[in-house]
Amino acid sequence: MARFHRLRVAAVDRLTDDSVALALTVPPDLREEYRYAPGQHLTLRRRADGEDIRRTYSICSPAPEGGGPGTLRVGVRLVEGGAFSTYALKEIGVGDELEVMTPAGRFTLPPAPGRYAAIVGGSGITPVLSIVSTLLERESGARFCLIRSDRTAASTMFLEEVADLKDRYPDRFQLVPVLSREEQQAGLPSGRLDQDRLTALLPALLPVGQVDGWFLCGPYGLVEGAERALRGLGVMRSRIHEEIFHVDTGAPAAPTASAPAHSTVTALLDGRGGTWPVREGESLLETVLRNRPEAPYACKGGVCGTCRAFLVSGEVRMNRNFALESEETEAGYVLACQSHPVTERVELDFDR
Ligand code: FES
């Protein structure tokens, strides 16, 4: 079960004009709880003016082998008007304490031999940096191709860290940078990485059919375009892993189904169960939170996957789902923040 602890900020490193990396110290007694798989994220919480503001940020550092980490490093990019990112870039300093949830997320790659590739946009590099650096360090039989899209060189996060990987693993790491608003001296011409461009580009870069895992991370438009390009090139859906950072407002929602006039949700959370009536229009997460404020969530937008629960019985309608893979929904998992009851009784298990 995900929990918050207060962790101290050990360093604030400026990456670009609008992004920083925050390093957080994990005391020895909490290290096991913060053990993470490369690609996972942390939810940071800030309480201001009576509001509970939560944001998820991916861990960028390689996952340590053996025990849990002594330090966690996350990348934070400023979002226009963003309540947490503005605070992170303008106010957080060394020595401050932050409320940090234990790691979560299934956009991960346990190190294994094979050929892997990623297509990332902007801050989508953050979890992939942890995935690539852990993989190349631990697995000599692994190769990785990173295709990254950024606006300009100056706005590119982790430029040095990625260049360093290229120096350390010249035979096993292939880097393909694309800038959308600036010409590069060497490399590909500028422009957006959309479906058509990727369809033409990918077969020229690597043997697409031999890639064991594709990792797509960034804004909704880029991830959707990359998935369509890969599917068009014959890549199986099971080899494609996705994490979306921002969802455009035009992103599709599931069709609505009629809701029962009265319904209840029964939820098991941290070994304790309860049954409560669902108020009209509210999500199952909101019902559970009114009664169990410790229920896990971060984005409430169907993107981060923190509110994942197993649907034990009943039926729900999910508005949006950008977090769960199809195998997870087929196995019975739902996002509580997006779920509304279709049957009069619904039973969720957050512990499974
Ligand atoms: S809280 Fe992020 S998907 Fe539900």
Image: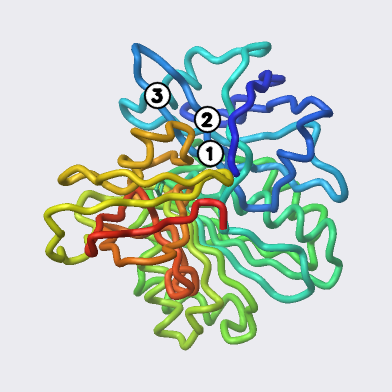
| Disc assigned to residue 57 | 1
Query: Marks 2 and 3, how far apart in space?
Result: 10 Å
Residue nearest the observer in this picture, 89 or 287: 287
Query: Marks 1 and 2, how far apart in space?
Result: 8 Å
The quadrant the N terminus occupies is top right
Query: Marks 3 and 1, how far apart in space?
Result: 16 Å
Q: How is the image coloured?
A: rainbow
Residues marked 1 and 2 touching at CB (< 8 Å)? yes
Relative image position of residue 262 (x, y in whole percent): 16, 52
- Of the two numbered discs 2 and 3 on the same chain, state the one appearing first in sequence: 2
Residue 225 visible somewhere in the drawing: yes
The quadrant the C terminus occupies is bottom right
Kind of residue at disc 2: Leu
Q: Is residue 25 left or right of residue 308?
A: right
Residue 12 location, quadrant: top right
Kindly report which numbered mark, 3 or 1, lies closer to the viewer in this rendering: 3
Residue nearest the observer in this picture, 6 or 180: 6
Circle 1 SS class: strand
Residues marked 3 and 1 touching at CB (< 8 Å)? no
Residue 183 visible somewhere in the drawing: no
Residue 139 location, quadrant: bottom right
Kind of residue at disc 1: Tyr
Residue drawn at the location 57% of the way across and 64% of the way down: 118
Q: Is mark 1 within 8 Å of ligand 1?
A: no
Residues marked 2 and 3 touching at CB (< 8 Å)? no
| Disc assigned to residue 44 | 2
Kindly report which numbered mark, 2 or 3, lies closer to the viewer in this rendering: 3
Circle 3 SS class: strand
- Of the two numbered discs 1 and 2 on the same chain, state the one appearing first in sequence: 2
Residue nearest the observer in this picture, 249 or 156: 249
| Disc assigned to residue 52 | 3
Relative image position of residue 345 (x, y in whole percent): 29, 59
